[in-house]
Structures are given as C-alpha cells and as structure tokens.
Amino acid sequence: MTTDHYRMSKIWVVSEYTSSKQNSTGYFWEKAIHQLKADGLQVDVLTLKEAVENTTKKSIVKRAGAKLMAAAKLAWITGRKARKGDVVFSGTNPETLLFALSVLRRLIGFRWYVLVHDIFPENLIPAGIIKKENIFYKLLKVIFDWVYGQPDRLFVIGRDMKELIDKKTGKPARSFFVHNWVDADQVFPIPKKNSKLIKSLGWEEKTVFQFFGNMGRVQGIPNILQAIDQVSSARAAFLFIGAGACVDLVSTYKKTNLEKNVHYFGELPQEQKSEGLAACDVALISLEPGMYGLGVPSKAYFSMAADRPILAVMDARSEISLAVEENDIGWSCEADNPEKIAKTIDHICRMDLSRYEGRSKNVLQKKYSDSVALAKLSALIQADMA
C-alpha cells in the first residue's frame, strides 16, 4: 500500500496541549504527531491558540469550568474543519470534549480514534469527588459508557486499562494496548552524587525516594504520608517535586514532622527534567487505592529513562506493577497497605542498590521507548485506514 493512499484521509489531531514545552500530555502528542507525519500520513493539528489557564491548584468547580471552556472551543474548531471520511484523533481530556466529538462523529461521519489516558467518570470515585451510589454519578456512568463505545479505535496505555475499557464498552475488538512513550535520548541518567539538589539537602548518604510530577487527588499522596509515618530507617529520605491538589498536604506534613527527612521542592521546568529525576535512589510511583485500570502514571517511564528502580504503590496487577515485576526493576506494594509500604522502604534502605544500575534504562530502550510504542501506534492506524 502506498503512502499516497493514506493521504486520501486526513488525520485531525485534536488536543489542548500539543507541545512538549507545555506538559506531559503535550509531550506525548508532539511525539505521536511527528511519527505519523514521518510515516507519510497527512496530519493537521487542531488546538487552542492559548491553553486554558492552569487550574491544578484551584477548586473543582473552577477546574470543571476551565475544562468545559476548552472542550467547547476544541469542538467548535473540529466541527468547522473535519469532513466525512477524515479521521479525528483525540485524547480523553477534557472529558466533555469526548461527548461533543461523539455527537459530531454522527453528524459529520468522520472516523474517530481516542488515545485513552483516563476513564471517566470512574476516576472521580478514587479522587474522592463523588460516591458510587450518587445518582449524578450513575447518570454520568450511563452517558460515558455510551460515549466510550463510539470511537472506531481506542488506544489504551495499560493492560489493566484495556480490561476495564472492554468491560465498559463491550467492544474489545476496538481497543488496543499501546504503552506510553519516552525518548530515551532526551532523558539521560545522572549519578545521584552529582545532583545539586541532593547536595543542597545534605542527603548524599541517604536512600532517597522521590515522587515526581502531578500531585493530584488520584496519586495516593495521603497513603504515602501514612507510610512515611511508619518508616523506621534513619537512612530513608523523601523528596516531592511537582504541583497539584495535594501539595498542601505534603507541605503541612513536612512542617509538623521535622524528625522525618521530607522535602517539597516545587515544580521544575521541562528542560530540567533529567536533573530532577536524578535527585533520588528510587522513584516512588503511586496511585490511590481503587485506581486499577483508570490511569497509568507516565512518570514511571521517565524514571526508567533516568535509570532509577521503581517502588510501585498501587493496586495489584496494575500496568506499572506488572512492568516492575516482569522486568525486575524494583518493588511493588498494594496501595491500601501503609504498613507494608513502610516495611518495603525499610528493606530497600538496607539493600545495595548497585545491582539495579543500568537495568531500568536498558528495559526502557528495549521495550518501552518511543520508537517501539509509536511504531505500533502508527501501524495500527495505517492498518485501519487501509
């Protein structure tokens, strides 16, 4: 099949974020767009001139309003540009955009692909935003079960997520597992002893566990803080880098538990990601209990690229737990067991971690690099468009 055939159908990538300079969502889309274009597909981007104001530290109502505004603008642009026979390729955020695109798909007749990073409204429950018994949640569930069943192709980023999305839609033939992607050459390993941040804290001899990235409601921050309470090793130190709704919890914990080695650094610019990821011995990747299949922390792949072993704290058989266990690049613990998490941390502090040197980076390059994931994504898209 020639590339000229594929150019008959245009792919419209629809996303609020499409640049690695914006955030991790923009990073993934930038890489995907570049790959699809390199493979001869005709790709155009529909995005906003200016992304809606960052509301991660604001109220749920203000965040919902900002998402609704972004979704309305993106839906309007899509409705004006997309034509019958085209392909519209979107993500799952903002959530209301999914509903709008499902309606536009029926009106216009384009094919619709979705890169699934979140499953709504199920993710509202572990976030503590709504209860499963709430009538409004039940209504949302009915609506979005239908919405997720509308795309022609769903590209999910975890095996646990595929299990959940297939149950939600009842259409397993439409979903395909494509893991998250990281350019192994853009994130490079730096020895912890060379970290300026570690030196400034005087933690050269500590075993440093680092939480890096979004500190939101589903990242299991309260659970981690409960585990830190029970850690007995004097070597253990905990560094938090990022932003989100749970920043105040970490800051308050630091102030009220001065005997613990806990530090909140704040946010880091994208260009300093390698330096930030280097400021630890172990990457701490966690999710709230009940997040099975609802999300896959992309930070895990960046930590692999930085050649750090991973302590995965999440529901058993979640995608990152599976990756850690299958490749022997760290440890996994159930998210709802702070006592076991604390004992695992104490155990790690007694270990010689040199056995993990080079292991995570090697696994990423062979199995989880952008070249592997994006080749699979592009092949699936080309096969569907043939």
Image: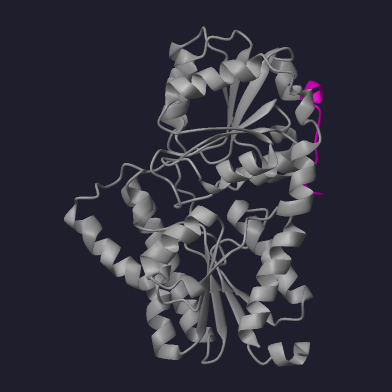
Q: Main secondary structure of the magenta part?
A: loop
In the rendered image, residue 186 lying in the magenta stretch gets the answer yes
Q: Which residue sits furthest front?
A: 326
> So how many labels did they put on this image?
0
Q: Is residue 314 left or right of residue 303?
A: left
What range of the chain is rendered magenta? 184-195
Give whichever of 137, 202 is nearer the camera: 137
Location of residue 46 with respect to 285 vertically, above or below? below
Give whichever of 300, 246 is nearer the camera: 300
Picture quadrant where residue 129 is located: top left
In the rendered image, residue 66 lying in the magenta stretch gets the answer no
Q: Which residue sits furthest left?
A: 135
Q: Position of residue 201 (x, y in %)?
A: 68, 15
Q: Position of residue 313 (x, y in %)?
A: 51, 34
Q: Is residue 120 left or right of residue 366?
A: left
Q: Position of residue 58 (x, y in %)?
A: 39, 43
Q: Position of residue 358 (x, y in %)?
A: 81, 36
Picture quadrant where residue 75 is located: bottom left
Location of residue 247 with respect to 214 vertically, above or below? above
Residue drawn at x 75%, y 45% as measured from the top left: 363
Q: Is residue 346 visible?
A: yes
Location of residue 199 with respect to 63 vertically, above or below? above
Residue drawn at x 67%, y 18% as measured from the top left: 207
Give whichever of 77, 219 is nearer the camera: 219
